[in-house]
Image (cartoon, rainbow, N blue to C red):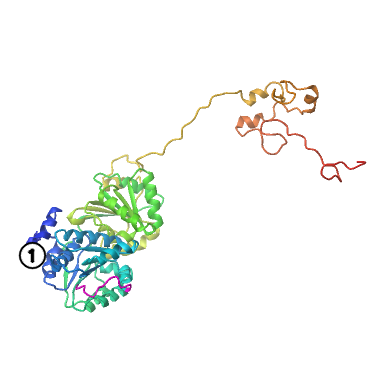
């Protein structure tokens, strides 16, 4: 391994990296930094998680000097907001011992704070294409002096349809500049873009000849699972021995939120990142995950490129990605910085054709995923899940039975004796606690067994079909309006 000091990196940057425990350079850094420092245009290609950010960030910071003049001198373009925040944090860390100021410019956040930093003289801008062009059109972002230009994750920009925006940005920056392009894959349109806007670039591909298309330090497991059983399977995987931080990818925003709620209800410490969340909420979720406050992150592909956490042990594909590139970027969230990881992918019966294409492209040699359920023995052995593990850490609270006192005898016991009759209360006019003979004669009697069956069944004594009230007493007799009467006055001779 080669140290950063041996690559010609300034001492203050070396010391800053050493404080973070970073001393030795990764292969992509070892090859790109010596070329980037003197100003050579570079096309850097390496798998995700291999340290590309420092590969282009260290030359940019060092070439600007210790005290660069105010104004934008370097522009780093990234495809997603999450990656923008991640790259900003890394570059800002590299400038710790310098007067260089870094600003992150991306959508979903208020303009005012970003504009204020630009007016304060920030020299390095890390941003997404849409917000960069927006601020430039408003003449709030001047790119005419940006002699350092970096395109990070260029293949993702192609997938998101950002290439026209990238061409507009290149028209805003100086013709004479130092340009670096980094990407995990190198499709044809990206190669054409590099030839058009770069000057004699050197193509560096940092891979091991025997490694193959996927990282050798990631164990890839593929299961054919039923959609109704996936939540239970995932919950049991989350209890595997040695499991650390875990990222679960879903295809849709709605599925991500549903799974987050379900796993949270089962007792797991989850956070989610998807397009229906505000940018502030997404950043809070990412920060909680990185800090270890949450150990399970449920995300859509929007966050796949911005999760740069070294201690992710498991990646779970709740739904299979659409192509092999997306699969590589999802799985690349684990096994970073030389560590090992596990990538688990669930394939629905309807998605077997997608897996066939991914299997062929990545040379997995698993054309038929193993049919797997939450009770399958091989699931426990493959992922070191303790025997007897169930998919719930907490149980739902039980409703407490409240015992009521028998303050009064039941109606059924009252009805077993003599028929009930209404007794006048002593506080009623003329009431002495007894009823007159005329009143008793006028009041209809209620059968002794009336309502006893309903009361025994717990349904009450009033079914809505008779004249009686819910208390078992007969309804008062209604006055019949005589034919031809108005306002209740009797008609003469009637």
- Image coordinates of residue 446 in percent, x first then y, are 73, 28
Q: Quadrant of residue 165?
A: bottom left
x and y, in percent, of residue 85 in the image: 27, 60
**Residue 324 in sight:** no
| Quadrant of the image occupied by residue 95 | bottom left
Other-residue count near label 1 (Cα within 10 Å), few / some / many at <14 / 14–19 / ≥20: few
Q: Measured along the vertical axis of the image, is residue 260 above or below residue 490?
A: below
The residue nearer to you, when weighing 19 against 272, is 19
Looking at the rendered structure, the secondary structure element under dot 1 is: loop
Q: Is residue 102 left or right of residue 441?
A: left
Residue located farthest toward the left when viewing the structure as drawn? 6
Q: Which residues are magenta?
A: 137-147
The residue that label 1 is drawn on is 8
Magenta span includes 139: yes
Which quarter of the rendering shows the C terminus?
A: top right
In the image, farthest residue toward the right = 493
Question: In the image, 120: left or right of 432?
Answer: left
Q: Position of residue 345 (x, y in %)?
A: 31, 55
Which residue occupies the foreground of this view, 316 or 261? 261
At 23% from the left edge and 53% from the top edge, which residue is drawn? 341
If the image is split into quadrants, where does the N terminus sit? bottom left
Look at the magenta stretch and give its main secondary structure: loop
- Please tell me whether residue 221 is drawn above or below residue 414 in the rendered image: below
Answer whether residue 477 is visible to the viewer in this image. Answer: yes
Q: Nearer the viewer, residue 224 or 74?
A: 74
Residue 439 percent coordinates (x, y): 78, 25
Q: Residue at x 75, y 24 (%)?
A: 430
Q: Is residue 454 above or below residue 159?
A: above
Asked whether 352 falls inside the magenta stretch, the response is: no
Who is closer to the viewer here, 436 or 197? 436
Q: How many marks are shown on the rendered structure? A: 1
């Amino acid at each position: 391994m080669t140290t950063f000091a041996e690559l010609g990196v300034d001492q203050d940057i070396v010391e800053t990296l050493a404080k973070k425990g970073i001393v030795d350079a990764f292969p992509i850094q070892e090859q790109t930094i010596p070329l980037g420092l003197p100003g050579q245009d570079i096309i850097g290609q390496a798998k995700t998680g291999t340290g590309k950010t420092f590969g282009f960030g260290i030359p940019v910071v060092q070439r600007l000097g210790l005290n660069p003049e105010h104004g934008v001198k370097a522009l780093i373009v990234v495809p997603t907001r999450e990656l923008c925040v991640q790259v900003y944090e890394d570059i800002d860390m590299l400038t710790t011992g310098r007067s260089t100021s870094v600003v992150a410019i991306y959508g979903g956040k208020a303009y005012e704070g970003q504009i204020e930093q630009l007016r304060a003289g920030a020299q390095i801008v890390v941003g997404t294409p849409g917000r960069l062009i927006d601020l430039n059109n408003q003449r709030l972002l001047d790119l005419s002096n940006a002699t350092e230009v970096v395109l990070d994750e260029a293949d993702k920009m192609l997938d998101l349809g950002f290439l026209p925006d990238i061409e507009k940005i290149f028209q805003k920056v100086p013709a004479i500049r130092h340009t670096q392009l980094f990407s995990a894959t190198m499709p044809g349109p990206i190669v054409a873009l590099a030839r058009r806007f770069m000057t004699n670039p050197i193509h560096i591909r940092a891979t091991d000849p025997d490694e193959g298309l996927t990282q050798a330090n990631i164990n890839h497991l593929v299961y054919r699972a039923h959609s109704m059983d996936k939540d239970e399977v995932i919950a049991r995987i989350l209890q595997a021995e040695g499991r650390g931080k875990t990222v679960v990818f879903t295809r849709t925003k709605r599925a991500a939120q549903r799974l987050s709620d379900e796993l949270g209800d089962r007792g797991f410490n989850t956070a989610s990142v998807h397009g229906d969340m505000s940018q502030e909420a997404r950043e809070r979720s990412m920060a909680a995950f990185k800090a270890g406050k949450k150990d399970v992150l449920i995300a859509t592909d929007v966050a796949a490129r911005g999760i740069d956490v070294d201690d992710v042990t498991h990646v779970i594909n709740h739904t299979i990605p659409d192509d092999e590139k997306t699969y590589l970027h999802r799985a690349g969230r684990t096994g970073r910085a030389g560590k090992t990881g596990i990538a688990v992918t669930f394939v629905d019966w309807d998605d077997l054709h997608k897996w066939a294409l991914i299997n062929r492209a990545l040379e997995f040699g698993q054309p038929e995923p193993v049919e797997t359920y939450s009770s399958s023995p091989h699931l426990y052995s493959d992922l070191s899940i303790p025997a007897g593990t169930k998919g719930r850490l907490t149980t739902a609270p039980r409703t407490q039975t409240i015992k009521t006192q028998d303050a009064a005898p039941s109606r059924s016991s009252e009805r077993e004796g003599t028929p009930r009759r209404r007794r006048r209360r002593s506080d009623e006019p003329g009431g002495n606690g007894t009823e007159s003979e005329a009143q008793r004669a006028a009041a209809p009697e209620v059968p002794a067994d009336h309502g006893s069956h309903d009361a025994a069944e717990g349904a009450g004594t009033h079914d809505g079909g008779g004249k009686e009230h819910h208390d078992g007493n007969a309804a008062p007799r209604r006055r019949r309006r005589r034919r031809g009467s108005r306002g209740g006055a009797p008609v003469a001779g009637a």
